[in-house]
Amino acid sequence: MLKKDLRKKYKELRSTLSEEQIEDKSLAIANRLLQVGIWDNTYFHLFLTIEEQKEVDTEFVLQILAGKDKEIVVAKSNFETLEMTHYLLTDNTKFQKSDYNIYEPVDGLEVPTSKIDVVFVPLLTYDVKGNRVGYGKGFYDNFLSKCKADVIKIGLSFFEPEESIEDVSPTDIRLDYCVTPMTLYSFR
């Protein structure tokens, strides 16, 4: 399928999920993440959930990261440049909701992309080769292209993969893993 058709399909599938299903599936995803061999790393980039989009609730992942004393990095998006600025999450980090319903840090300690070891990547769907479909702005492909070559890219999804995405672009960056409530997929 084409990305535009997949976006429509998975937005519709997400819209059918209840709050309880989202919570249960998100908790299962967080628990399955414990099986991924990433925990020796230090800097973890985590997207903050857009509830209105019925995304995976990353609060459970945040709790695991905090419990393991990891450095947690969150982003602020600039929709004019399609760039993200990355900030260390601290007890003093203040957040505000953007015009796009994204909780973002107001300011803080900026973290260069070269420091980031693991990125949890939001997505609508992905395929069996690790190609992903996001919302179509290219924020994450742009960001990931600037990360170090061995950064670990992990998608979080309520759903199993598609067989293929027909219109993959040369600038699309593939995932290393995708975690669902039932399965851990490795694309390495």
Image (spheres, grey):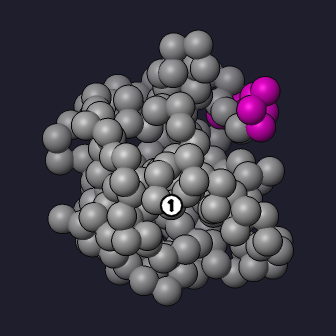
**Quadrant assignment, res 69:** bottom left
Front residue of 76 and 65: 76
Q: Position of residue 85 (x, y in %)?
A: 49, 24
Main SS of residues in magenta:
loop
Q: Position of residue 87 (x, y in %)?
A: 51, 30
Answer above or below: position of 32 versus 119. below
Answer above or below: position of 117 versus 181. above
Residue drawn at x 69%, y 81% is 24
Inspect the image, locate mark 1, and give the three-letter code of the amino acid beneath it. Thr
Is residue 103 shown left or right of residue 124?
A: right
Is residue 40 shown left or right of residue 84?
A: left
Q: Is residue 122 magenta?
A: no
| Residue 22 appears in view | yes
Q: Which residue is mark 1?
A: 125
Is residue 101 shown left or right of residue 40?
A: right
Q: Is residue 94 magenta?
A: yes
Answer above or below: position of 72 versus 23. above
**Quadrant assignment, res 70:** bottom left
Residue drawn at x 61%, y 67% is 60
